[in-house]
Image (cartoon, rainbow, N blue to C red):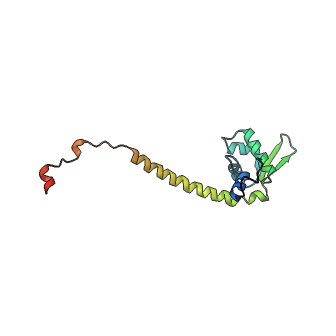
Amino acid sequence: MKKFKAHTSTCPIVYTMTYIGGKWKPIILGRLLNGAVRFGKLAVQIPDISRKILTEQLKELEEDGLIIRHSYNEKPPRVEYELSGIGQTVIPVLMAMTELGSQMHEAITKHKRRQDLFAKKIPVKATSIPAISKKDSRS
């Protein structure tokens, strides 16, 4: 875990993001919302993360008390992760982030489509614009 420096901010948002922020932690926590998940299944559910980074992020989340690691003395070894009591307090934040993300994605997609439509140059033929004669402009 990156050590929280008291002098950087007293802002609760900064403090929260120290523990659950970053590229992978919210995704990992989101995968644990429905209960314990084995390491291998997490790796499959989050295909863009390397096993090394997944291991590091899980260790940090465990050290901070957000998740619990269950190691079973079996062959082959089985390890499961689940949200701790503290980790469960993050659920409303993750759900709000999910809802906001869906709304933002939709709004930004619409915005970009509008920008693309306005950015396209539509060729106008000179003959399609009626000429105004001097006689018409006087009336």
Instruction: Confirm whether residue 33 shows in the render.
Output: no
Q: Residue at x 28, y 43 (%)?
A: 124
Residue 15, given in percent of the width and then of the height, sits at 72, 55
Could you tell me which residue is drawn at 38 percent across and 44 percent down? 120
Query: In the orientation shown, which residue stands out farthest toward the left?
Result: 135
Q: Position of residue 40 (x, y in %)?
A: 74, 42
Residue at 50% across / 50% down in the picture?
109
Q: Going by the picture, which residue comes out furthest to the front?
A: 7
Percent across and percent down for residue 67 are 78, 52
State which quarter of the image contains the C terminus: bottom left
Q: Position of residue 133 (x, y in %)?
A: 14, 49
Identify which residue is drawn at 68% across, 41% down: 49
Left or right, 132 with reference to 104: left
* Depth order, front residue of 112/51: 112
Residue 89, can we see it?
yes
Q: Nearer the viewer, residue 40 or 21?
A: 21
Q: How many marks?
A: 0
Horizontal side, residue 89 vs residue 78: left or right: left
